[in-house]
Amino acid sequence: MQGIGIEHYGEQPRLIDIPLPDPATGEIEVELFAASRNPLDEAVAAGHLAGHGEFRFPLILGFDGAGVIRRTAGASAGFSAGDRVFGQFWAAAMQFGTFAEATVVQARPAFGALRRIPNGVSFEDAAAAPTAGMTAVGALDSSRAASGDTVLILGASGGVGAFAVQEAKARGIRVLAGVSPEAADALRALGADDVLPRDADLPEALAALGAAELAAVLDFTGATDAVDVAAESVRGGGTVVSTAYGVSDALRAQNRIVAVEYVLDEKPARLERLADALSAGAVRPVVSREIGLEDALHRPAPPRDGLRGKTVIRLR
Ligand SMILES: NC(=O)c1ccc[n+]([C@@H]2O[C@H](COP(=O)([O-])OP(=O)(O)OC[C@H]3O[C@@H](n4cnc5c(N)ncnc54)[C@H](OP(=O)(O)O)[C@@H]3O)[C@@H](O)[C@H]2O)c1
């Protein structure tokens, strides 16, 4: 079986050929139709998650995917051969990721989550959704922002950001998005109420929009300086939530607002909620590119006049 993987940490990922094992009890074998890239994949390849669970080599990369179950073995969490499934295929131990023709994974993945693909949702959209969509839902939950509140989203054009804009709008939240000028129109079309250029004077821009007080800032960039500035416009008791280590020491040390680094949690419940939102059309993945397996090796540049969104790898 061919996949994109590494023999050791730090190596440039490459096309490798390894046999897929038979599923053990509690595992399923899935023929993959599509996968999607996340920054997490590069972090794993670099060895940054070496202390978080066991990774076996040669390691096929990729967590997000969608496909059809070929075989089940023993208790299979209600799944059967022929089911269309999607999710974060994060097994313990992790060896057979989604950048491949097929995978074997626990029916209830130890660190991930799987579900049936809702009717009417394509393999490509299903593969684009799991990590970014679940993280957007979790970060918003963590922000405690509610209907009628205003939130500022930094990195709104990326994979997580594009989901967060839609999820926030679905919750009745006013969304301000910090992005590059090239992405402004596409973000408005996605639902952002207002778009702030990355280099704008934030207090001035917020005052001009009549949004001097934010309930929350969601950061998907890790740009601590920009997060620090944005945090000053959050009302007392409000929140800053970063998924990208964007909370500076100074921000962590103050107690006027709540500042947290969010790590994706409660994956099965969040995937269920995401599946419902996809099924209802409340959110849709923004797929900026579809590429082949060989092209999955490199992070593509953002599109010139649209959103970075998600890059999907077609496997069939
Ligand atoms: N904690 C968790 O559990 C968890 C889960 C998922 C993701 N994450 C992290 O969350 C972050 C977002 O993930 P993603 O999948 O959305 O990544 P992504 O698709 O690469 O999007 C990142 C976004 O941030 C923007 N950006 C990056 N650096 C910036 C900077 N210095 N200043 C301004 N904007 C900047 C990018 O703009 P361009 O498009 O113009 O480059 C893009 O809009 C990543 O750091 C990822 O590792 C964490």
Image (cartoon, helix red, strand yellow):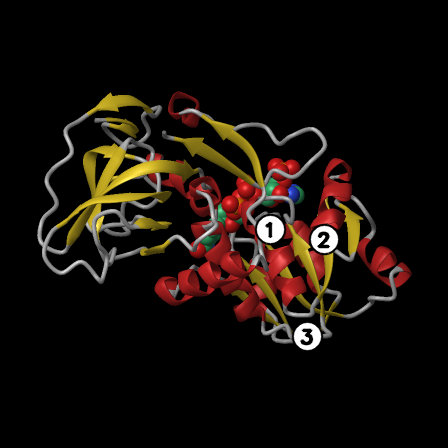
Type of the residue with mark 1 = Gly
Mark 1 Cα shell of 10 Å, populated few (<14), some (14-19), many (≥20): many
| Residue at the outermost bottom position | 237
Mark 2 vs 1, N-terminal side: 1
Residue annotated with mark 2: 177
Amino acid, disc 3: Ser
Q: Earlier in the sequence, mark 3 or mark 1?
A: 3
Q: Which residue appears at 32% of the width and 55% of the height? A: 112
Query: Residue 275 location, x and y as percent?
Result: 45, 59
Give SS at disc 3.
Answer: loop
Residue 38, position as x, y percentages in the image: 45, 41
- In depth, the one of 113 and 239 nearer the eye is 113
**Cα–Cα span, label 2 and label 1:** 9 Å
* Mark 1 element type: helix
Give, as a three-letter code, the residue at label 2: Ala
Q: Is 85 positioned to the left or the right of 182 in the image?
A: left
Residue drawn at point x = 63 percent, y = 57 percent: 166
Percent of width and height locating residue 161: 60, 51
Label 2 neighbour load within 10 Å: few <14, some 14-19, many 20+: many
How many dots with numbers? 3
Residue where numbered disc 1 is placed: 161
Looking at mark 1, is its residue's CB closer than 8 Å to ligand 1? Answer: yes
**Residue 119 visible at all:** yes
Residue 72 higher or lower than 149, as above or below = above
Q: Nearer the viewer, residue 291 or 124?
A: 124
Residue at mark 3: 147
